[in-house]
Image (cartoon, rainbow, N blue to C red):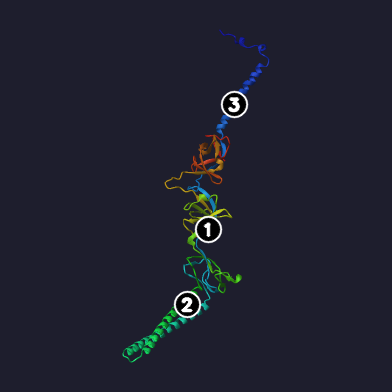
Amino acid sequence: MVKDLSALRLRDDARAPGEGGRRGWIIAAALALVILAVAAVVIARGSAAEVTVAQAGAPGSGGPASVLNASGYVTPRRRATVAAKVTGRVSEVLVDEGMVVAAGQVLARIDDSDARRRLEAAEAELRVAAAMVRDLEVNLTNAERELRRARDLQRDGVASDQALDQARTSAESLRARLAVAREQVRSAEAQAAVYRQDLENYTVRAPFAGIAVSKDAQPGEMVSPVSAGGGFTRTGISTIVDMGSLEVEVDVNESYIARVVPGQPVEATLDAYPDWHIPSSVRTVIPTADRQKATVKVRITFSQLDPRILPDMGVKVAFLEQVRDGEKNPVRSAVPSGAVRQADGSSVVFVVKDGRAERRAVTIGRDLNGAREILAGVEPGESVVVDGPAALRDGAKVKIK
């Protein structure tokens, strides 16, 4: 038996005025909110945040970190402007710029005609003194014979004591004169040696092996070991540089000199070759400060010299951190300063892996001039987020710009 369901229908006059319309709107609004929430979740899960990434590098090209940077110049420990020891006119110059010279090699000759005349006169006096010695030796030999004869005659009673005394006096006088003559010979020899050395001073020689970097005099010019004659007298012949003694000289601010110690590793970069990093080390810290500049001079030795390194070249140096014996150098990395964020009171970095952001807590080291040293948490070569949404979360999809 089928019952009539029409009896269950609410009569139109039994409904409150406007109640059906309000209920419909409430249901429709709730459904819309649910749909929007589901759509937002779907969109959020399906979309990727756009980020800018950078690759974490190893500070100091994988080696020790730099603790201080400075700039200076390449200077030789041995550089000499070679000059003559005497004043005179240049007669010959045997050196030119860029020439390799050996120790003792003749660089120039000064007109030595006057010195030769003086030496010849001294040698002539020496010969005269030597001849006088020979003459006195002959006379002394004869006087000694006469003395022996007078002694024999006086013993036989033939000669008087006076004759014996005269013969003895003559022999002793000649013996004294011979001693004086021999001293005169030695004096003449010394004088000749002085003039011989004076003549040698007119030849200018290289004090050590190196390269001539300048030629400062020409034949016909006057040269002097001291400044004389105004601008018409040269004081040098040539400048010689020992290329095996090249090193770097830098001025370090006295506030940071405690970071520099002898033997410390250094990385030098010439301004002429910015991509060439030269291994070096601190040779010495000069134990005095410049009160005008508030700096301390530091000398740095190249580990290996190269023909491209030239005197007076500009150079930038990075003083590297020293690792003590037995201490392992921890794996460090360097990331841009913008990659480090603060979350919950600690430093974090977002690393991009497989298209997602992975949040990592990191240990911060030194400030590396626009970058930050990471002691732990990020390895060199990993991609880190430098610029991205502030609400970026762990595991979120990311899209690299």
State left or right for residue 121 relative to residue 148: right
Q: Amino acid at mark 3?
A: Ile
Which badge, 1 or 3, comes first in the chain's sequence?
Answer: 3
Say which residue appears at 48% left-offset and 60% top-offset. 245
- Of tags 2 and 1, the one toward the viewer is 2
Query: Dividing the picture into quarters, in which one does residue 341 lie?
Result: top right
Task: Compute the Cα span from label 2 to label 1.
Answer: 47 Å
Q: Amino acid at mark 1?
A: Val
State left or right for residue 21 relative to residue 396: right
In the picture of the structure, the residue carrying the numbered disc 2 is 191
For the N terminus, which image quadrant?
top right
Say which residue appears at 57% left-offset and 32% top-offset. 44
Which badge, 2 or 1, comes first in the chain's sequence?
Answer: 1
Of helix, strand and loop, which one carries label 2?
A: helix
- Please tell me whether residue 254 is drawn above or below residue 364 in the rendered image: below
Say which residue appears at 51% left-offset and 50% top-offset. 258
Rate crowding at label 3 as few (under 14), some (14 to 19) or many (20 or more) other CA atoms within 10 Å. Answer: few
- Please tell me whether residue 33 is drawn above or below residue 110 in the rendered image: above
| Residue 106 - label | none
- Of tags 1 and 3, the one toward the viewer is 1
| Residue 35 - label | 3
Q: Position of residue 269 (x, y in %)?
A: 52, 54
Of helix, strand and loop, which one carries label 3?
A: helix
Q: Position of residue 302 (x, y in %)?
A: 48, 56
- Please tell me whether residue 370 is drawn above or below residue 395 in the rendered image: below
In the picture of the structure, the residue carrying the numbered disc 1 is 74
Q: Which of the two residues, 169 or 196, is positioned nearer the viewer here?
A: 169
Q: Position of residue 88 (x, y in %)?
A: 55, 74
